[in-house]
Amino acid sequence: MLNLIALLAISPNQAEAPEISVKLDQTAGIAGGPVRGTATITFAPGLHGYQNPPSQEYQIPVAVSVGEESFKPVKIKYPVGEEHKVGGENEASRTYSGTVSIPFVLKSPAKPGKHTISVKVRYQQCTDSMCFAPKTTTQAVEFTTKAAPKGWTIVSGAAIWAKALSELK
């Protein structure tokens, strides 16, 4: 019985959840325009997640997505992870540990108004010897789309898109 209690104490569902925050660079923008933001994940000491794309096919990487149908992901820039020797692996894997920031650019809906963006962060935390069950955390952030100002042209729209994508770090 004592072994069962000890096994439950280290159950794969018991890992300390990472701190996750989502911030937008702006709270309002032109309808159909870019929305820049960052998802930040902080893993507890001794835990890591796999980079996206993962080093090995079987690894479940950290992934950012949008649950709100009216916002479309345009670009998500995953950083390169650190090389880390995991468990009994022969090759090092690339992982995220500590704090990792993942910038993204979304396309806002064409309809002006107040919107809620549901940003989802999927992760699987691991120690050097075991992995926990994958989880998804959703954070809601508010964004207001406005009609294009008078005199707005296709060139104006292209310029703000070029700027948003070039500033993605």
Image (tube, rainbow, N blue to C red):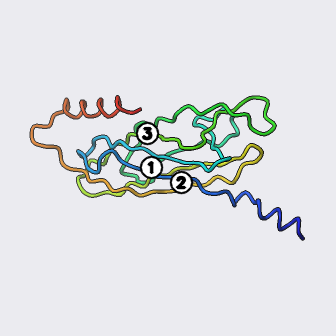
Mark 3 or mark 1, earlier in chain: 1
Crowd rating for badge 3 (residues with CA inside 10 Å; few <14, some 14–19, many 20+): many
Eye-nearest disc, 3 or 2: 2
Helix, strand or loop at disc 1?
strand
Q: Are marks 3 and 1 in contact (CB under 8 Å)?
A: no
Q: Which residue is mark 3?
A: 103
Residue beneath the point at 26% across and 47% down: 110
Residue type at mark 1 is Val
Residue beneath the point at 76% across and 48% down: 130
From mark 3 to mark 1, how far is it between C-alphas?
13 Å
Q: Residue furthest left?
A: 150
Helix, strand or loop at disc 2?
strand
Residue type at mark 2 is Glu
Mark 1 or mark 2, earlier in chain: 2
Residue beneath the point at 64% across and 33% down: 94
Please provide percent x and percent y for residue 24: 36, 47
From mark 1 to mark 2, how far is it between C-alphas?
18 Å
Quadrant containing the C terminus is: top left
Please provide percent x and percent y for residue 132: 70, 52
Q: Is residue 61 left or right of residue 69?
A: right
Eye-nearest disc, 3 or 1: 3
Crowd rating for badge 2 (residues with CA inside 10 Å; few <14, some 14–19, many 20+): few
Quadrant containing the N terminus is: bottom right
Q: Which mark is residue 19?
A: 2
Q: Which mark is residue 127?
A: none
Mark 3 or mark 2, earlier in chain: 2
Q: Are marks 3 and 2 in contact (CB under 8 Å)?
A: no
Residue 137 position (above or below residue 74): below
Helix, strand or loop at disc 3?
strand
Please provide percent x and percent y for residue 149: 13, 43
Crowd rating for badge 1 (residues with CA inside 10 Å; few <14, some 14–19, many 20+): some
Q: Which residue is mark 1?
A: 66
